[in-house]
Amino acid sequence: MISNCENPLRNCTECEFKSPLFCYLSDAELKLIDKNKITVHFNKGETIRKQGTYMSHVISVNSGLAKLYLEGIEHRNAIIRIAKPTNFIGGPGIYLDQRHHFSVTALTDTTVCFIDVAIFKEIIDTNKIFSNEFMKDFSRSILSVYNRLLCMTQKQMPGRMADTLIYLSEEIFESPKFTMYLSRQDISELSGMSKDSSVKILREFQNDKIIHLTDNEMEILDFEALHRISRTG
């Protein structure tokens, strides 16, 4: 169930969950965003936005985790990124066709701010520093997708899985040990392989003592081996 927060987060000037990019905004610009945003809580598994729908807002993640994925043929999806607190979720539709080109679903209970896209574009047009920093952030996200595409097209399945686990550990959870909020299906869609193949490789990594995996937790035991598998593909 989706609901507006009864007690929304503090205004944008005080909010501790706002994007670091907001430090490039003036108080007046922060107040403008504050007046043109809606804070919404999503339960785990709920759709935050749907591929193909009209883009009326840019999303800022305040808490929780969300998966960004392309919806393919016959319900075959490809996860392109995991969004975590302070991340922006926008997309090429902001300037192209006002459409969402990927879906977003909450992996955990997640709170986001929907910022009016017209106000967001207005600030980009008038604040050169914010615009430059936003484009850097957007470009980093695109480069990450390019690297994952290269991995999925040129590496064998063990290399793809190694890259996925490195990504989760180093970029998303920033720890060798983390709660597995992603399902086995999510892991397979993030790695570009079938669920059966994904489960098989995880089991092999566990048998080789590279990882320790339970239903709810993942721990990387041998980063050196994981990076070696990533390099050799």
Image (cartoon, rainbow, N blue to C red):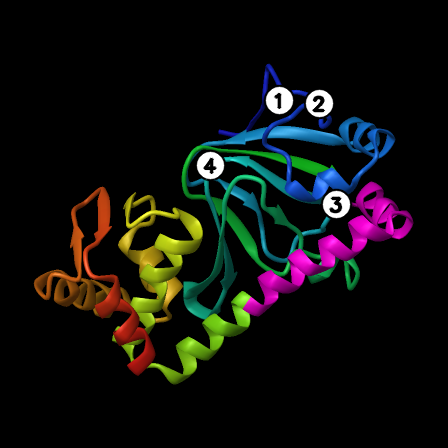
For image coordinates 71% across by 28% down, the residue present is 12
Between the C-alphas of marks 2 and 3, the distance is: 21 Å
Residue 207 painted magenta? no
| Residue 233 in view, yes or no | no
Q: Secondary structure at mark 2?
A: loop
Between the C-alphas of marks 4 and 2, the distance is: 19 Å
**Is residue 199 found left or right of 13 in the rendered image?**
left
**Mark 1 neighbour class, 10 Å CA radius: few under 14, some 14 to 19, many 20 or more:** some
Q: Which one is in front in this view, the residue at disc 3 or the one at disc 1?
A: 1
Q: Amino acid at mark 1?
A: Leu
Which dot marks residue 56?
Answer: 3
**Secondary structure, magenta segment, majority class:** helix
- Quadrant of the image containing the C terminus: bottom left
Residue 138 painted magenta? yes
For image coordinates 68% across by 37% down, the residue present is 114
**Mark 4 neighbour class, 10 Å CA radius: few under 14, some 14 to 19, many 20 or more:** some
Q: Identify residue for label 1.
A: 9
Q: Position of residue 90 (x, y in %)?
A: 67, 52
Which dot marks residue 11?
Answer: 2
Q: Amino acid at mark 4?
A: Gly
Q: Is residue 84 above or below residue 73?
A: above
Q: Answer yes or no: do the residues labelled 4 and 2 have beta carbons within 8 Å? A: no
**Is residue 169 found left or right of 109 in the rendered image?**
left
